[in-house]
Image (tube, helix red, strand yellow):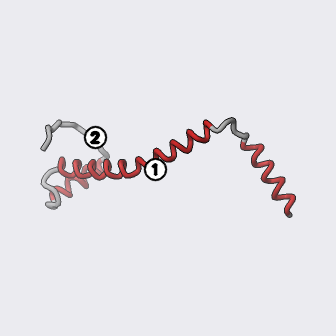
């Protein structure tokens, strides 16, 4: 195991009780083991979502770099006018 660093965390009472009950029930050997697994799961989800986040950031940047935008009120007014013309 790599070097270990001791940390103190705070959490709501219901989470702390669930943590204690999980250890008391024998699912894990210690509260630290539960927290380490939860953090590994969180890191895995975060890493899996990172490409999606980068795609969104790139799309936002492309939009910003594409030139000046059109005010939303103007866009909606044009859409309303087109819709009214078709009715």
Percent position of residue 35, x then y: 23, 48
Crowding around mark 1 (Cα neighbors within 10 Å: few <14, some 14 to 19, many 20+) is few
In the image, 8 versus 60, the foreground residue is 60
Name the residue at 25% across, 55% down: 18
In the image, 3 versus 26, the foreground residue is 3
Numbered circles on residues, count: 2
Residue situated furthest bottom in the rendering = 87
Percent position of residue 5, x then y: 17, 36
In the image, 32 versus 14, the foreground residue is 32
Q: Is residue 77 left or right of residue 59?
A: right
Crowding around mark 2 (Cα neighbors within 10 Å: few <14, some 14 to 19, many 20+) is few
Q: Callout 1: helix, strand or loop?
A: helix
Dot label at residue 72: none
Name the residue at 87% across, 58% down: 85
Quarter placement of the N terminus: top left
Q: Earlier in the sequence, mark 2 or mark 1?
A: 2
Quarter placement of the C terminus: bottom right
Dot label at residue 10: 2
* Above or below for 25 versus 17: below
Q: Is residue 30 left or right of residue 10?
A: left
Percent position of residue 44, x then y: 31, 51
Q: Is residue 61 left or right of residue 35?
A: right
Label 2 to label 1: alpha-carbon separation: 31 Å
Q: Is residue 71 left or right of residue 28?
A: right
* Above or below for 79 versus 11: below
Q: Which quadrant of the figure has residue 82?
A: bottom right
Residue underneath mark 1: 52
- The reply to whether callout 2 and callout 1 are in contact (CB within 8 Å) is no
Name the residue at 20% across, 53% down: 20
Q: Callout 2: helix, strand or loop?
A: loop
Percent position of residue 70, x then y: 72, 40
| Residue depth check, mark 2 versus mark 1: number of the one nearer the observer | 1
């Amino acid at each position: 195991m790599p070097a270990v660093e001791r940390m103190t965390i705070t959490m709501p009472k219901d989470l702390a009780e669930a943590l204690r009950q999980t250890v008391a029930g024998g699912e894990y050997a210690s509260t630290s083991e539960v927290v380490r697994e939860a953090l590994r799961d969180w890191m895995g989800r975060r890493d899996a979502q990172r490409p999606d986040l980068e795609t969104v950031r790139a799309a936002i940047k492309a939009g910003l770099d594409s030139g000046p935008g059109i005010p939303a009120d103007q866009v909606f007014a044009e859409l309303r006018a087109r819709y009214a013309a078709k009715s």
